[in-house]
Amino acid sequence: MQKIFIIGLPRTGTTSVCAAMLALGYRVAHTAYTERSFFEAQVLADTPIFCDYQRLDSAYPNAKFIYLARDMEKWLPSIAQLLARMHNNLIRDDGGFNPIIKRCYQTIFSPYSLANINNLE
């Protein structure tokens, strides 16, 4: 089965694109944390796709990739707000979010810190 990967950072429209793909009849995984989700979904987006797209390109040589972007002036405050809400669960050593979410967010938004989240520069 050919895969379609939506490469978009959080707050760039991945949810809207996934909803559209569902309406078109595709099997969609808005996030994919298990082998089963990768096996069953035709369209995959969000975590871990935005972090692992290069490995996915090698693992699925016939896959299609759709890149999403959002105007920086609108995206920065939106992602800063999301990261601030997620921060405590992203840095906890005793649980919090799924380890895949933690790895992806800490990798992409590196160096990951509350100070960096609050600095839109």
Image (tube, rainbow, N blue to C red):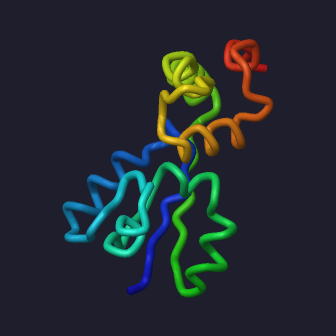
Q: Residue 76 at x, y = what percent?
A: 62, 25
Q: Residue 47 at x, y = what percent?
A: 51, 49
What residue sits 56% from the left and 24% below the top? Answer: 83
> Would you place residue 12 above or below residue 19 in this image?
above
State left or right for residue 53 relative to residue 112: left
Q: Residue 107 at x, y = what percent?
A: 71, 42
Quadrant of the image occupied by residue 102: top right
Q: Residue 110 at x, y = what percent?
A: 77, 34
In depth, the one of 116 and 71 nearer the eye is 116
Q: Which quadrant holds the C terminus? A: top right
State left or right for residue 40 relative to residue 59: left
Quadrant of the image occupied by residue 3: bottom left
What residue sits 48% from the left and 28% below the top? Answer: 96
> Would you place residue 48 above or below residue 103 in this image?
below
Q: Residue furthest front?
A: 94
In depth, the one of 33 and 69 nearer the eye is 33
State left or right for residue 92 relative to residue 13: right
Q: How many marks?
A: 0
Q: Which quadrant holds the N terminus? A: bottom left
What residue sits 55% from the left and 26% below the top? Answer: 94
State left or right for residue 69 relative to residue 16: right
> Would you place residue 54 above or below residue 98 in this image?
below
